[in-house]
Image (cartoon, helix red, strand yellow):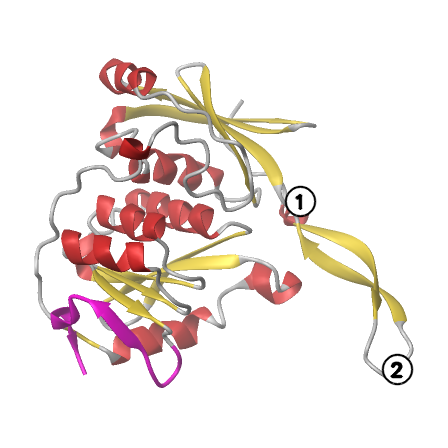
Amino acid sequence: MRPCDLPEPALTLPAAMLEVVVRESGSERIDTVPEEVPVALSYNGISHAVMLTSPADLEDFGLGFSLSEGILTQPSELYDLELEVSEHGVVVQMRVSEERFVGLKARRRTLSGRTGCGLCGIESLDQVARPLAPLAAGQPMPAASMHNALRQLQLNQPLRASTGGVHAAAWADRAGNLLAVREDVGRHNALDKLIGAMIHMDADPRQGFALVTSRASFEMVQKAASVGIPLLAAVSAPTGYAIRLARETGLTLAGFVRSDRHILYAHPERITE
């Protein structure tokens, strides 16, 4: 099958709802909610994981997941990617190098496809943290860039605008101009899709930063650092584990990014106030 996403209407679903306001009678109407479908990630014919995702940008998702999870070490190790759409979901069929496939079989794990799954399905604790190359220092960036990107992101989330129920991950240049946005019901999926989009557009991760509309958890920091993104800005809180990993890898971690404030938790030297 030729690679293609599901049609645009598949991203949302009409659902009957009863809206109740305190001290007022309820009213019935039709609401628009985000859709999610099972997406199987298959390597050389062997299914590796099944995730629940928004059915869009799945080529980006397949490549981004493969890189951020350490299945591939570089994009050129992915030889082919096709989507197989059925009534049960979508299979992302990927053909990878024999060396990477052998490595995948050696560390095989099965992921249960819960929405936004992070570390579910890992078989032992030593699989949680994997070695990551330290990030280069780079040139400092104005703090205003994060706020500039946030203002633009709020206007560039069509799925959120229609449903109110999805996360977004955005890539911005050093001035805070948005270059790519990906949305998904799962925050990890949105970031994986963004990473895949960055690879497809030949973006240099050293020349910008990622902004996510969620908390900054350990695996979000790990995914960003694994592909060389030097700054992860989140609109919500980080976890302690995420902060420790950011400090170890050299990633600048910002949380509670709002229109007029932010908090720096790791490597603030990259930001000029």
Which residue is painted at 34% across and 29% down in the image?
A: 124
Q: Is residue 120 above or below residue 184?
A: above
Looking at the image, is mark 2 or mark 1 earlier in the sequence?
1
Task: Give the residues in magenta.
Answer: 258-273
In the image, 143 versus 83, the foreground residue is: 143
Residue 193 image offset from top left, x and y in percent: 41, 46
Q: Is 173 left, or right, of 95 in this rendering?
A: left
For the N terminus, the quadrant is top right
* 217 to 46, vertically: above or below: below
Which mark identifies residue 24? 2
The amino acid marked with disc number 2 is Glu
Q: Which residue is mark 1?
A: 10
Percent position (x, y) of residue 12?
Answer: 68, 51
Is residue 5 rendered magenta in the image? no
**Mark 2 secondary-structure assignment:** loop
Quadrant for residue 262, please give it: bottom left
Tell me, yes or no, whether the highlighted magenta stretch contains residue 265. yes
Q: Secondary structure at mark 1?
A: helix
Q: Amino acid at mark 1?
A: Ala
Distance of label 2 from label 1 (alpha carbons): 34 Å
Q: x, y percentage for residue 264?
A: 24, 72
Displayed quadrant of residue 258: bottom left
Disc 1 packing (10 Å; few <14; some 14–19; many ≥20): some
